[in-house]
Amino acid sequence: MTNENLGPAERIIQSLITYTDHAVHNRPGIVVPDARLNVGVRWEPVTHKEEGDAKEKVVYRLSKDGKKTVRTRVGVLGADGKIREGATVVGEYRPAGIYPEVATWMYRQVAEVWRLDNEFAARWASYAFGQEHRDLKVILAAFMLVQSRKGDPVVDGGKVSFYDEDFRDVGEAMILLVRKDGKDFNPKLLVRVHDLLCLPQIADINRELGFGKSARNPFLGRWTKAVEKWLRYREENPKLLEGLVKAGFKQTVADLCRMVGYKPESPKLFEALRWKQAQSKDGRRTLALNKEWAAAETWEGQTEEQICQRISGSKPSWKVIVSRVPKAIGVTRAIAAVAIESGCLSSKDLIIATPTLEDLGLLKVQDVRDRWEKAVREAEDMRAANIAQRVKSKDVKEKLQDAADTAVKKAVDEVVKDIRTYFMVDISGSMEQSIIQAKSHVAKFVQAFPPDRIHISVFNTSGREVSIKHASAAGVENAFRGIMAGGGTDYGAGVRAVAGHKPTTEETVIFLFVGDEEAPRFEKSVRESGLNPAAFGFLKVRQNNYDAVRGTASALGIPCFLIDENTFSDPYSIPRTIRNLIASTPVGSGVVRTAETRMVLVDLIQNTPVLLKPTWAA
C-alpha cells in the first residue's frame, strides 16, 4: 500500500508502529543518510573530545559490544554542525533534544489525518492522551493547539447561526487535564510542545496548512494561553506547585513563566521557586523586587549518619536523594539501604538502580533482595532488558531478562487473544548480513506470543518451518543454529512452509516478514495457503526498488505496515509495537475487509469522546 493511498486509519497505525518513541533523544548523536527509513536518516549516539593543539572536537560513535561501550572515531565536528573525516562529510552532529526529522515526519502524518478528517484527528488526540506514547502526545497536542478549527462563528444571512467546532480546546485539554496515572503533561512536556512548534520544519508545515499569518515567526496557537492557565492554577493551588518543586521541576516552571511573560498574583510563586526578581529596564515589575529567599535545602557538609537520619525522617524520593548527596560522600551502602528501608524507591527505581545495588552488595541482603525481586516480578515495561546489560552477576542478569520477557507477555496478553501470527524470515544470499538482526527480532516477538499460536519459517527459493523449543533469546539462537544465507528469494516458499497450521474460525491471522523484497509478488501462494491474513507487518532490512511484500498486500486488499528496525533496538517500544500492530487488525473471521472497518484501533479512536477542558479552565 503506497503512502499516498493511506487513509486516516492507516496513517495512524503507520505512525504508531514506526517512530513514536524516537522523536526525542536525551543524549547527543550523529545523523547519517539512510534510504531504508521513512525519514531518510539514521541517528546513532556519539560523544566528542577536544584533541590536539588545535583543540579539534573529535566525535566518537558509541556502540555496544556485550557489556562494553565501544568508542569508534567518526570525524571532526565543525562550526556548521557537520562531522568531517578529511574532506568528506560523514554526518551531522545533533545535541540532545528533539530529533527534527522524526518529529517532522510524525507531525506531517498528523497533518495528513487532519486534512482527511478533522474530527477524527481530534478524537485521535483525545485517545492518545490516555496512552503511553509521550512523544506522540506532544506532537498531537501541538497540532491541535494550532489547527484552524477554533470555534469561529458561522454567519448565515448576516447573522451568526452557530459556532464551529473548537478543536483547539482538545490541545488545551491535553495540557491542562491532570491524570492520577501520571500520563498527563509535566512542565518539561509543555516546554517540548513549544520547542516542537518552533522547529523551522514544523513552522513550514503550519504555513502550508494556513495556520497563523506570520511568514517569519512560528505559530504557537493557543500554547501561550494554555500555559498561562496552567501556571495560574498551580499558583492558586500551592500544594501542586510544591509538588512540582519537590519533583525537580523548579527551573522548568520558572522557564515557562519567562516564555509566556507570566505575571503572578502574589510573591508566593517566586518564593516557592526561590526565584530572585530584579527590576526590568522599563520598570514594570512590582512584585518581590530584590527580595532574598531562603536557600534550597542542601546536604553539603553533612556526615553519612546525618544524611541517613534526614532520609529516614523526611523520606524524599530517590531522585532527590541522588541529587542532594554530596559528591565527596556519594551514594553509599548505608544511604541506599536506609532509602530502601524508608520506602524512597518505587519498583521502577529499584530496577533502574540495580547496577548500583549490585556494586554496593545490597542484593545479597535478604530484605533488599526480597523487595528487588518483587519489583522485578511486577515490571510493566522492558526497561529491565537494558539494565541487564550493565550488571555483572549472571543470576541478577537472568532475573532482569525474565522480567523483561514477562513485561512483553503482560503488555500484549489481552490483545493477542484470538490472534495467530506467522513470522517469516528471508535467508537468501542478499540477507547474509541481516540474519543476525532477524534472529534478534524473532526473539523479541516469540516471547510475546503463546507458543502454540506463533509459527516461524525461513526461506530462500524453498522454505522450512523453524521450531522454537523455548520462547527466549537462547531458544531462538539454538533454533537458527546452522542456518546460513544463500540462494534466491521466494516469499511464497515461506508461506507454504507454515501453511499447515490453520487458524480456528475465531482467530485473526497476521503475517510478519523480515526481508528485502528483492523477489516477485506472491499473492497466489497466500491465497492457496487458506490462511487469509488480515494484515502484513514488514521490516525491510535493505533498500531497493522492489515491492514484493507491499505489492502482494495491495493485491490482496489488506494493509502492510512497515516496522522500523529501531523499534527492536529500543526494548521499551517492542510491546507497544506488537500491541499496536495487532490492534490494527480486525478480530474474528467474519470481518469485512474495508478501509472503514478493517481496524479495531480505529473503532476505539472513533468512539473516544473529544477531550474537554477542565471546568476551572473553561
Image: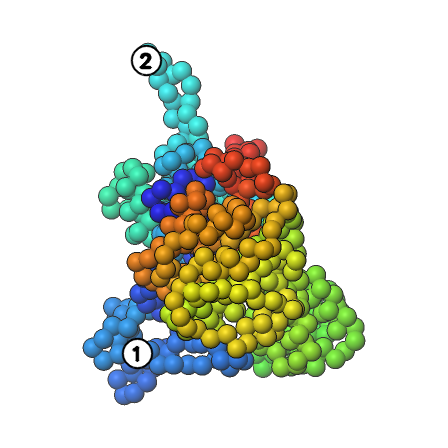
Position of 430 relative to 365 (above/below): above
- Kindly tell me whether residue 44 is visible in this rendering: no
Whole-percent x, y for residue 13 in the image? 47, 47
Say what amino acid the circle numbered 2 marks: Gly
**Residue 363 bears which disc, if any?**
none
* Badge 1 or badge 2: first in the primary sequence: 1
Q: Dividing the picture into quarters, in which one does residue 179 lie?
A: top right
Residue 503 lies left or right of residue 125; in this view the side is: right
Taking the view exactly as shown, the residue that stands out farthest to the top is 157
Determine contact: label 1, label 2, CB under 8 Å.
Answer: no
- Kindly tell me whether residue 213 is visible in this rendering: yes
Position of 98 relative to 211 (above/below): below
- Residue tagged by mark 1? 75
Whole-percent x, y for residue 166 in the image? 44, 30
Q: Distance between the Cα atoms at labels 1 and 2?
A: 66 Å
**Residue 158 bears which disc, if any?**
2
Q: Nearer the viewer, mark 1 or mark 2?
A: 1
Q: Which residue corresponds to the image point at 52% horizontal and 69% vertical from the top-left?
A: 440
Whole-percent x, y for residue 496 in the image? 51, 57
Say what amino acid the circle numbered 1 marks: Gly
